[in-house]
């Protein structure tokens, strides 16, 4: 590589200018402070007193984690993207389906078979049905039955001989309640 005459001349003038600069002497305390710092570092190296344990751990964690952080984040991101690409096409989309089976988590008690004894009178009765489908308790909600013992016995006979469908919870029979509206079943026949 060939140098120009101008480049050589500029290098020579620079070196002459640097030689003509006056010399600066360092302050006397600089020499002593450097010696003190060097002796402290030597003592730390000899006796094993380096930076504090927390500083050492932080430095170790930084040196360990920095090379692993970016690949780890990229791996997690890739896994999420690939999983979503796999799940979304295979996830069954629910539209209107004709084969949909309604789930009944609970059902109420209902009358399965009416007893042979007819109840007379207009009465509203709340019946508690046990898990076998039989009446376990009843309460007359509306109707004047307090003074009429014959009507009360007629209602009790009707309820004892009636078979109920028990209430269910998750497919298992449980105790439930049903409200019955009993009306008089008298038929007047003239003739």
Image (cartoon, rainbow, N blue to C red):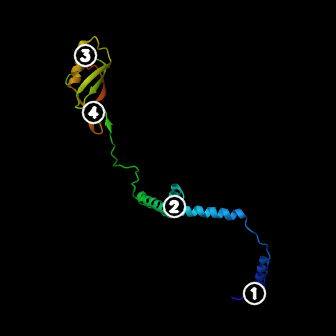
Q: Which is more foreground, mark 2 or mark 1? A: 2
Q: Toward which corner of the image does residue 148 lie, by quadrant?
A: top left
- The quarter of the rendered structure image containing the C terminus is top left
Residue at figure coordinates x 33%, y 45% from the top left: 101
Q: Which is more foreground, mark 3 or mark 4? A: 4
Mark positioned earlier in the residue sequence (1 or 4): 1
Q: Which is more foreground, mark 1 or mark 4? A: 1
- Distance from Cα at disc 2 to Cα at disc 1: 58 Å
Furthest toward the top, the residue is 147
Left or right, 13 with reference to 173: right
Residue at figure coordinates x 54%, y 61% from the top left: 44
Mark 1 surroundings: few (<14), some (14-19) or many (≥20) residues within 10 A: few
Residue at figure coordinates x 23%, y 18% from the top left: 154
- Distance from Cα at disc 1 to Cα at disc 4: 108 Å
Left or right, 12 with reference to 97: right
**Residue 47, which numbered label?**
2
Q: Position of residue 159 (x, y in %)?
A: 23, 23
Decide: is 71 above or below 130: below
Report whether residue 112 is seen: no
Query: What count of labels does the image hold?
Result: 4
Report the residue marked by disc 4: 174
**Residue 142, which numbered label?**
none
Mark positioned earlier in the residue sequence (2 or 1): 1
Mark positioned earlier in the residue sequence (4 or 2): 2
SS of the residue under disc 3: helix
Report the residue marked by disc 3: 152
The reply to whether discs 3 and 2 touch (Cβ–Cβ < 8 Å) is no
- Distance from Cα at disc 3 to Cα at disc 2: 103 Å
Report the residue marked by disc 1: 4
The reply to whether discs 2 and 1 touch (Cβ–Cβ < 8 Å) is no
């Amino acid at each position: 590589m060939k140098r120009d005459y101008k480049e050589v001349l500029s290098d020579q003038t620079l070196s002459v200018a640097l030689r003509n600069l006056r010399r600066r002497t360092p302050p006397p305390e600089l020499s002593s402070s450097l010696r003190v710092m060097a002796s402290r570092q030597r003592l730390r190296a000899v006796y094993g007193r380096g930076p504090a344990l927390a500083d050492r751990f932080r430095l170790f964690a930084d040196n360990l984690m920095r090379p692993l952080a970016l690949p780890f984040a990229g791996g997690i991101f890739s896994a999420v993207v690939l999983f979503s690409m796999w799940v979304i096409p295979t996830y069954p989309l629910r539209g209107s389906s004709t084969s949909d089976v309604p789930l009944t988590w609970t059902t109420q008690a209902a009358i399965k078979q009416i007893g042979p004894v007819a109840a007379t009178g207009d009465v509203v009765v709340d019946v508690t049905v046990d898990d076998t489908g039989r009446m376990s308790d009843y309460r007359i909600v509306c109707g004047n039955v307090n003074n009429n013992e014959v009507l009360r016995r007629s209602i009790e006979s009707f309820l004892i001989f009636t078979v109920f469908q028990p209430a269910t919870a998750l497919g298992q029979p449980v105790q439930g309640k049903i409200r019955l509206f009993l009306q008089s079943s008298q038929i007047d026949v003239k003739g």
